[in-house]
Amino acid sequence: MTNYLYMTNKDFETQAILDRLISKEITNKKAAELLGLSKRQIIRKKKKYREEWIKWLIHKSRWKPSNNKQDKSKYTKIFELRRNKYHDYNIIHFQEKLLENHNIKVGYWTLRNELIKEWLVKHKKRKDPKKQYINRPRKECYGEMVQYDWTYDKFLEDRNWWEELCLLVAIDDATWKVDLKFEKSEWLIPTMIFWKEYFETKWKPRSIYLDKFATYKINHPNATDDKDLPTQFWRICQTLWVKLIFANSPQAKWRVERVNATLQDRLIKELREANICDIDSANKFLKKVFIPKFNKKFKVKPKQEADLHIKLTKQEQKSVNQIFSKHSIRKLKNDFTISFNNELYQCYRATDWKWPMLYKWDSITVEEHLDWNIYLSKKWKYIAFQKLDKKRNRIHKLPLAPVSNEDYNKMKDKIEELEKINKIQLENEVELLKTNILSHYQKTWKKHPWMKNFVITKSH
């Protein structure tokens, strides 16, 4: 006897219409109209219904396991992996790892439903957004805009628990290709190192989209957007003709913010699997393994295939170390010295066109390079200089600068000779100066302003 529990409401409706058709209460045309079928199909159904009655209405595969049903042992292995190894992975990342490491292919929604049934994943309802933002369309070409940001996290977890690393992130707006680097902080020097490597390998982008952090922009209310007070990073970008765009909110540069969230989830697990414990090996892992793999998976095809990165000129390539350095302006004093960081530096006059001519009260640029060496320059030309010891006396007679850098050691020997002048010789020179000046003013019957206490001493 046919089990009526297997029949659905649609089956009962079809049975009632076929019964009326057989009893000639309705025609074939009306039955076809009621069931939404053709007249030919109704004739075929009526014939089958007469032969097999209700048994024919129920599909033979109903309540039977599917022919494509997957083996349950496969899911037991998945559940074990989820509990023991991949307990904190999201479902998409877990699905990728199953295929990559264990050769288990399973659909996203099937995996999600099975994990929810086993209480290995919590089902969360989506929250309705309080505000709805309209996303700015992506740029059309590669290199037209790069979004830049940084994020702090315990990327190395317990393997390096005492150090929280900073991940510098740059993502191209058109293709979503990323460039990553681990640093200890996001201050000026790591930022300059990151962008120097970017400009040397991928060349200059048209613009950089970033936030209003103090490293990039002066945020004091009395000095905002003042061209006379640029930050060091702003000066670098102005020198290289790269436009800086400052976002007013995190939602404005949401692409790089979204990538930050993805990296905080995925990168921590990848570093754990590779068993990386220090920042140097983490940066090597990023360049060789993670960045190519990440870009291959998440990159997007741009609307136009043109690359708008601008190649560094020959002059920029030569002076790239000079550009990517911390600049400070100092005034040249009467004795051709400048003070910087509580130290004295003696500058030398030039004899060749390769070296700039120096005058009193010139503006001298002090450059702190990324290798922590200090150089002095005027209008992008280097100056010959020497660091002075404060305990010693300054040099009165300034030697001429060497014609080339190779003669610098010879110049040092001359300076040491001048420093070793006897005190007696200096005193004689001072006495001669005194008598000459006093005799001049006595002849002309004028009073010298220093007549009362006229003493020439060495400046300290």
Image (tube, rainbow, N blue to C red):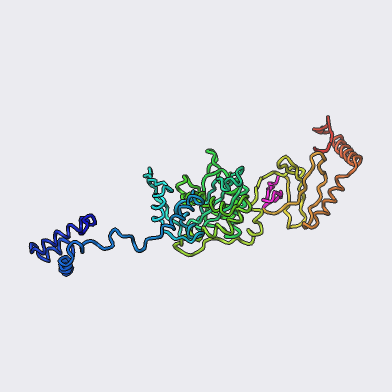
Position of residue 357 in the picture relative to residue 262 (left or right): right
Q: Position of residue 215 (x, y in %)?
A: 58, 45
Give the quadrant of residue 344: top right
Q: Nearer the viewer, residue 402 or 168?
A: 168
Position of residue 370 in the picture relative to residue 128 (left or right): right
Q: Give the magenta part as a residue range.
A: 361-379
Of the 4 image quadrants, the one containing the C terminus is: top right
Q: Is residue 370 magenta?
A: yes
Residue at 72% over, 42% down: 339
Q: Nearer the viewer, residue 143 or 130?
A: 130
Residue at 71% over, 41% down: 341
Q: Position of residue 369 (x, y in %)?
A: 68, 50
Q: Position of residue 301 (x, y in %)?
A: 46, 62
Of the 4 image quadrants, the one containing the N terminus is: bottom left
Q: Position of residue 168 (x, y in %)?
A: 56, 50
Q: Nearer the viewer, residue 213 or 229?
A: 213
From this viewpoint, is residue 308 visible?
A: yes
Position of residue 429 in the picture relative to residue 405 (left or right): right
From this viewpoint, is residue 256 visible?
A: no
- In the image, residue 127 sits, relative to residue 40, either above or below, namely above
Q: Residue furthest front?
A: 1
Q: Nearer the viewer, residue 195 or 24?
A: 24
Position of residue 266 in the picture relative to residue 61 (left or right): right
